[in-house]
Amino acid sequence: MIFYFCFNLRKLNQLALKPLYNEQDLLAKTAMGDEHAFGILYEQYHKKIYVFALQILNAQTLAEEVMQVTMLKLWQMGDALTTIHHLDAYLKTIAKNTAYNMLRRLKLEQSASERMSSDWTENHNDTEEHIILNDTKKILEEAIAALPPQQRLVYQLCHQEGLKYEEVAEKLSLSPLSVQTYMKLALRFLRNYVSKRTDIGALLIILKFYIP
């Protein structure tokens, strides 16, 4: 009787250790637009990717952004998902490239911001700076107003009110993936709109403080 109990206990442990989902099947279903399958992959990997990015960037907000971008890229791959055989390594490669690109962008922005600050100190007074900043903020407000309604609402809730994607998804009865997509499209539109209507100095301030 004791042997029978131990044998069955070992079988139960083996079943508990066996993955509940086949990763290749999940990738194939995600490639066909199955949000449930993608949600399972998201739950399995998003924390791991966040920790990996945090080791590179040493900043929680940036690591969160890298994780979201990485998982969004995975969702957008379509049929190419079926060619992935080592998802963990694949996602880490995307996260690493995204993180390094972010570091390079931040370094360029900091350098340009420092040059801009030095130039303005020498050539402009506070009143002129105030006018330039106000004019650029007005352009940003125009850009936000020009967003499609759903993108504008998601941007306002995520960026201006500071809600997390999951909180916005629950508030608007959307999936977290849809919130990520709307936010990505909104930020792309805002950057393009502002960049075409202001100079580089004012643009850098807007990108640093108003458009993440």
Image (cartoon, rainbow, N blue to C red):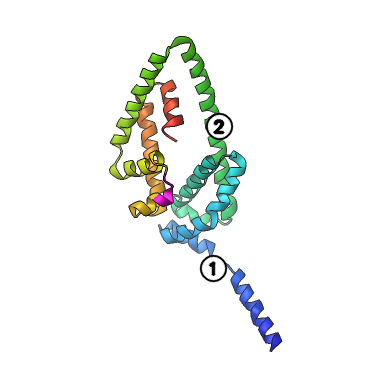
At x 44%, y 57%, the residue is 31
Q: Is residue 143 above or below residue 128?
A: below
Q: Residue 200 got which mark?
A: none
* Occupied quadrant, residue 96: top right
- Between the C-alphas of marks 1 and 2, the distance is 40 Å
Q: Is residue 10 above or below residue 181?
A: below
48 displayed left or right of 180 = right
Callout 1 secondary element: loop
What's the amino acid at mark 1?
A: Leu
Which region shows up in magenta?
163-167
State the quadrant of the N terminus.
Answer: bottom right
Indicate yes or no whether the magenta region holds residue 118. Answer: no
Can you identify the residue that label 1 sits on? Answer: 20
Indicate yes or no whether the magenta region holds residue 165. Answer: yes
Q: Residue 104 got which mark?
A: 2
Question: Residue at the right extreme?
Answer: 3
